[in-house]
Every structure is written in C-alpha cells, then in structure tokens.
Amino acid sequence: MLKEYSLEGKVAIVTGAGRGIGKGIALALAEAKADLVAVARTEQEINEVAKEIKQLGRRCLSIPTDIVKEDQVQRMIERTISEFGKIDILVNNAASITAVMPLVPLPHLGDSFPNAMSEEEWRGDFDVDLIGTFLCTRAVGPYLIRQKSGKIINITSTHAIGGFDYNAAYCASKAAKMRFTQTLAKEWARYNINVNAIGPGLTHTAMTDQYVFANEKVRERHLSKIPLRKAGTPRDIGLLAVYLASDASHWMTGQSLYMRALKNY
C-alpha cells in the first residue's frame, strides 16, 4: 500500500455502520488499518460489524447511538476518547429511509400516491441527515481543532444535485448536507481539518436489492439510464472513503465527489 493511503494509528467513527454503505465504509477503513467506532441504533448489527473488523486485526468499539439525541452523541464521543484517546476521522453516513411521495396529492397520479407527505416523514429525512450530522460534527470538532488535524466525510447522494419526482425531502436534505460540507471546510481549514462529501448513485444495498433489483422492469428502467449499465457497491464507496480519510487527500477540502456510472441528470 502507498504510505499516503495507510490509516494505521488513526481512529475513525462511522455512523450508520451496521449495514449497507456504512458497513462498506467501516470495513474498508479497517482494511486500511484504522481502528473503528461503529455507531448505529441497532446494537446487533454493529456488534456483527465489530466482529468482522476485529477479524481484520483492528480494534473496534460498537456503540448503539441515536444520533439525533444530543446526550447520546456526547456519550458516544466521550466513550471513544476514553477507549482510544483521540478521534481522527468522522464519517457522517447515517440516513433515514426516505418517504417516496408527492408533497400534496396530485390528480394526475390517481391512486398511485393517495397520501401527501406528512410533517413527520419530512422531518425524518432532515433529523438524521442534518441534525444527526450537526450533532456528531459539533461534538467531534473541539478534539480535531485542538489536535489541528482531522478528516470529516459526509455521505450525501447524487440526489443533492438533481431533483427527482416524489423525493422532495430526500433531495433537499442531501443538498443541504453538501452545502454544510462546503461551509465547514472553509471554517475549519486553518486547523488542518479536511471536510469532504461522497454522493453515491445507485448502489447495491439490502433496500435497493429489495425495491429495485428484485423487480426486472424496475431494475432495467434504472440501469438503462446508466451508460456502464451497472450499480455501485458499498465497497466502492468505502474505497473512496479511504482516500478522503487518508493523507492522500490532504490538499482536498470542501468537495463533493459523486460516485455514479455516468448517470445523466
């Protein structure tokens, strides 16, 4: 491995690490020799991830946390410092399962979408994507600023740069996360802290495997829009996260890198 890509001696926190993209990122960082803190609400899932990381020869602490609860986030950070003595990398990956529906009932849709989006469904996207990211980043910030080094990676989406029917909340929250990335990168640059984002396109996860790839017509409709005719994997996202978490990306900050097989918007 090129020395600039090694994460040996680094401590990384990954939210939403129990499955999908978060798990892919956590495992890739561990392969690059980082020690991990796996964070999610479902304890069983992050415990399983922790076992896999330990099999790679790295240390891993699994901490069940609801990242929209300030007291739980603070306890998670304090426990990380107590166990590892420092924090080098924060990956804000956790996201809610978005509600796909119009803002109000639309006559031309008939019974396809009989309900309008509720306030609870709208807040669901924003609470995890934005409030959770805000709380985790704010809690980690003083430690990174004190040591004058650190990497923050925010997971957004290709939806941040294009509007998609019946995805108003998801698109808006991902776009806001992109702007949060740019703003924080400028604020913290003088402390040698890099803040970047990854925007995955269509990626194989348990959710997309169920709702997209299990249905041949739906699968073909999505893949027909992608020149490479294939979706990404959590490991693909993890490999880019290794670059952004490592010294190889020391001269990059405030950027959002969109991982997609040339999908057009």
Image: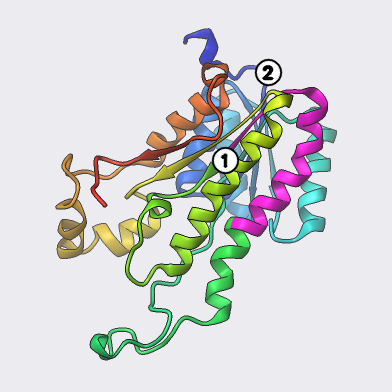
According to the image, what is the colour scheme of the structure?
Answer: rainbow
Q: Is residue 18 visible?
A: no
Residue 67, image quadrant: bottom right
Compared to residue 55, the image places residue 232 above or below, namely: below
Measuring from the top left, give residue 150's x and y in whole percent: 68, 27
In the image, taking residue 225 as reference, residue 50 lies left or right, namely: right
In the drawing, does residue 57 fall left or right of residue 20? Answer: right
Camera-side residue: 236 or 38? 236
Find residue 259 and name its label: none
Residue 240 appears in which quarter of the rendering?
top left
Give yes or no for contact between labels 2 and 1 (Cβ–Cβ under 8 Å): no
Q: Position of residue 91 (x, y in %)?
A: 59, 40
Q: Work out whether residue 79 or residue 103 is closer to the camera in this orientation and state it.
A: 103
Q: Determine the main secondary structure of the stretch shown in magenta.
A: helix
Q: Residue drawn at (44%, 72%), measured in percent from left and top?
A: 99
At numbered mark 2, what does the secondary structure look like: helix, strand or loop? loop
Is residue 73 in view from this perspective?
yes
Q: Residues within 10 Å of mark 2 (few under 14, many from 20)?
A: few
Give the residue type that dot 1 points to: Gln
Q: Which residue is mark 1?
A: 182
* Residue range of the region highlighted in magenta in the rendering: 130-153
Q: Is residue 152 above or below residue 251?
A: below
Q: Is residue 262 above or below residue 171?
A: above
Sequence-earlier tag: 2 or 1:
2
Q: Position of residue 148 (x, y in %)?
A: 76, 23
Q: CA distance from mark 2 to mark 1?
A: 27 Å
* Secondary element at tag 1: helix
Image point 53% across, 62% down: which residue? Answer: 96
Picture coordinates of residue 222 (x, y %)? 21, 56
Amino acid of disc 2: Gly
* Vertical order, 10 against 110 (above or below): above
Tell me the residue that label 2 is attached to: 9
